[in-house]
Amino acid sequence: MCPTVWFYLAEIYRLQDGNHWVTLSMIADAMGVSLQAASRMVRRMAENGHIIHEPYQGVRLTEEGEKIALYMIRRHRILEAYMVSVMRFGWDEVHDMVELLERGVDERIIERMDEMAGFPKRCPHGEPIPTKDGIMPVVEDMPLAEWPEKTPAQVSRVKTHDPEKLRYLASVKLVPGQPVTVVARSPFNGPVHLEASGERLVLGNELASELYVERPASA
């Protein structure tokens, strides 16, 4: 069974994306716990050498902490990929289901799921799956809200687990691999006008900031 601290380490890794330091309040919000509970866990992780804690700044993973975090992220994303590609659950269902399942799943089962899912490189939401030796593949993408107009792109990953948002994106075919072109962008953080599957769509700035795109594979 995976210790609770390992789930904290995985969440800190995710929170480090774009942040030099991860604050206590960020950890508490992400884990759904009080500041006091998060503080106790931060002390424990620092004592174990899994994080560096700088008062008034936040925390960062050590090399050992990152190794555990990547192991946990790999397990989570393989489980999601298996549940969508083999068990046929929707991509809007699996995140919460996996959080309930993953604590007790034996590593041999994870590896068999990886094989049965076809050794996926990304989870259903487009996030890269770390390799068995703990290497996180580099993804060069950016939010759709920042992508230049009239420049071909394809959906790379979706940075939300909100079921309603995921169902909507699936209904308009804005899923990983889908070609898109930003036609126009309204000023002052207004909506983004785009073309996908031959249709014109309008996304609010918030959702367009959670939908990441990259250059098409053929470009």
Image: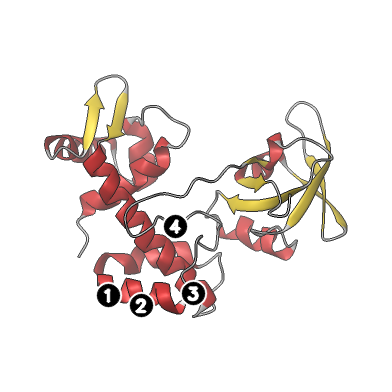
Decide if residue 112 is on the left or right side of residue 126.
Answer: left
Name the quadrant of the N terminus.
Answer: bottom left
Decide if residue 41 is on the left or right side of residue 168.
Answer: left
Occupied quadrant, residue 182? top right
* Cα distance between the residues tagged 4 and 1: 17 Å
Would residue 23 be seen by someone viewing this image from the given angle?
yes
Q: Secondary structure at mark 1?
A: helix
Question: Residue at horizontal 63%, vertical 46%?
Answer: 212
Q: Secondary structure at mark 2?
A: helix
Q: Indicate whether 176 appears above or below 110.
A: above
Q: Indicate whether 52 appears above or below 77.
A: above
Occupied quadrant, residue 146? top right
The amino acid beneath tag 4 is: Ile
Are the residues tagged 3 and 1 within 8 Å (C-beta)?
A: no
Q: Which residue is mark 4?
A: 129
Question: Residue at horizontal 53%, vertical 75%?
Answer: 85
Q: How far across and how far down the image is residue 60, in percent?
A: 30, 32
The amino acid beneath tag 3 is: Gly
Q: Which residue is mark 3?
A: 118
Count neighbours of disc 2 (C-alpha within 10 A) and say few if under 14, some if 14 to 19, many if 20 or more.
Answer: some
Occupied quadrant, residue 190? top right
The amino acid beneath tag 2 is: Arg
Which of the two labelled residues, at mark 2 and mark 3, occupies the earlier sequence position?
A: 2
Are the residues tagged 2 and 1 within 8 Å (C-beta)?
A: yes
Q: Which residue is mark 1?
A: 108
Question: Residue at horizontal 49%, vertical 80%?
Answer: 87
Which of the two labelled residues, at mark 3 and mark 4, occupies the earlier sequence position?
A: 3
Q: Which residue is mark 2?
A: 112
* Cα distance between the residues tagged 4 and 2: 15 Å
* Cα distance between the residues tagged 2 and 3: 10 Å
